[in-house]
Image (tube, rainbow, N blue to C red):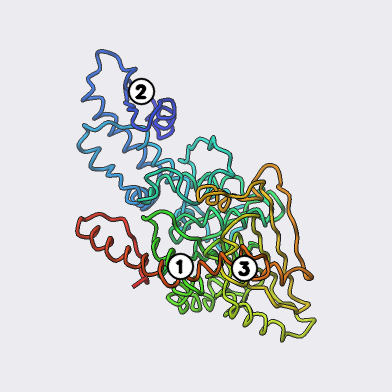
Amino acid sequence: MGQPIGFADFFLAASRVEGWDSEIIVEDGRVIPVENKSQETCLEKARWATWQAFEQAVSSLFPGDRLGDILHKYSFPLGDMARDGTFALVQRMVNKIATGAALPSVVDLSQLATRELIVMTPQEIGHTYNEACRAAYLAPSTAPLSDVRGGPKQAHEYLIQDFCLQDKKLVSLLQGVQHLDWETYMERLTMAINGHEIPEGTVIPAPGFPKGSPDFYEVYQVVAGKGLYAIALKPCSFKSALPPLLCFRCTQSSLGAIDAVHTWTNNAQKNIGEKGYTACKEALTELLQDRAFNPNGKITLAAYSLGGAHGGLFFRDHWRSVDNAYFYRSVHNTEGVAEQLASEINQLPPAFPGPSIYIDRVTGDWASYAGYRHVGHGITHLGTWIRVREFDLGFIPKNFAEWFNLHSMRALDLKAQPPKRLYFRDELFHELDNKLRGETIKQYEKLRRTLGDKILYYVFEFFYRIFGFIFDLMGIRIFRSSDNAG
């Protein structure tokens, strides 16, 4: 009697066929493409045997409820299909299992570990993480990593959330992050990784100390409502050097994303992001007071695009609890938000350390034209570090498609570092005030306020309510709301 067929056998066979719907079967103890079967083999019996072997191979890999979670997430009725035994087992089904295996949770690691994760070293957690990912036989992405982003790429992604495709991109983005420097990791985390809906409890690799060593975050909590979406990450281990992180997500292009239309209305407001921040303000305050997330009273804040407006409002209210704030391709807030923050920080004693603020943007990115003042404007306190860095990626967008591409490009992930300009104390107030950056930018914001606050906000709200009602009647699940969106 030969060795039992393992999941690796199915994955290798699936990787050798072309096309998502290419069928594989079990014949004589081997997994082969269906077109290679012998003439004597009955396809009906082969399919039955294939499903029995596949179900057994998959079930033996996963502890606890992990397999059930993967099957539920990807809407894959493995048990029903195995009992029926007449369906074709195709490449995309095998890839779903491999993708789900690559994103283990804290529960998955805890079931494999000999002691609690919290007391293990990051290196010990790394060994357990690799063991939990043993079924993740995923081929490396053929596209340059800088082209793997958080937003939609394929046409159907603009309508629905393809969780399997999302997770495949997420796995690519997480590969090798232990070798990144901290700011490159923060850019990738904020602009791409956080663009995916990551369940609470998921383990996220991070760069450790010394460089090249692995460390790990846990998605501790997701706070979402009325267009704001933030994930809170805490280190998996007490022995980690990672800070607690709060990341604010950008505008959503896919109608199937949580609160997608609400992100559009947030962009249309005079005070960008106010709607979402107001809905989540209490939950964010409670999160900050949670000692399990924030044991030392200081966190790191990171935000991208629309998330910069939400992050700016949060920073205004809770800057005393923020050590470092990173803003990428961020929209600006109103004058009042920046003025209140500056007024409070400037009252600190000169020798008292304030927060550090890092702002990265790209030449020609329209997002940085929105809003009037970025947080950091007006701060003169000597103990507060502020840096604005502008990258020139070589072109100015002439249409929305070009702008969307420019807006989502991660400058630090490019193989060749693009030219950049650094702005410090003498130039900061000019660069953080859109009224002073040129007449074009000033008029852009004036037009955004006129059209957005008075027209587009209500158009988006009407679209959401009417089409949401129609889709619900038809039983089509496109618009998805967060639990506290109301």
Q: Where is residue 282 drawn, in percent x and y?
A: 46, 79
Of the numbered discs in the image, which one, if any, rests on residue 33?
2
Q: CA distance from mark 3 to mark 2?
A: 50 Å
Q: Nearer the viewer, residue 270 or 61?
A: 270
- Amino acid identity at mark 2: Pro
Question: Could you say whether the residue bearing mark 1 is in a helix, strand or loop?
Answer: helix
Closer to the chain start, of discs 1 and 3, is 3
**Direction from residue 129 to residue 121 in the image, left or right:** right
Q: Which residue is mark 3?
A: 300
Up the image or down, 142 lies above or below 420; here it is above
Q: Which residue is mark 1?
A: 451
Q: Quadrant of the N terminus?
A: top left
The quadrant holding residue 143 is top right
Q: Where is residue 236 drawn, in percent x and y?
A: 56, 61
- Amino acid identity at mark 3: Thr
**Direction from residue 332 to residue 24 in the image, left or right:** left
Of the numbered discs in the image, which one, if any, rests on residue 101?
none
Q: Where is residue 392 drawn, in percent x and y?
A: 69, 51
Up the image or down, 339 lies above or below 263; here it is below
In this view, the residue farthest toward the top is 39
Q: Nearer the viewer, residue 453 or 271?
A: 453
- Amino acid identity at mark 1: Leu
Closer to the chain start, of discs 1 and 2, is 2
Closer to the chain start, of discs 3 and 2, is 2
The quadrant holding residue 369 is bottom right
Q: Residue drawn at (52%, 51%), measured in percent from left and top?
A: 404
Q: Where is residue 175 drawn, in percent x and y?
A: 57, 45
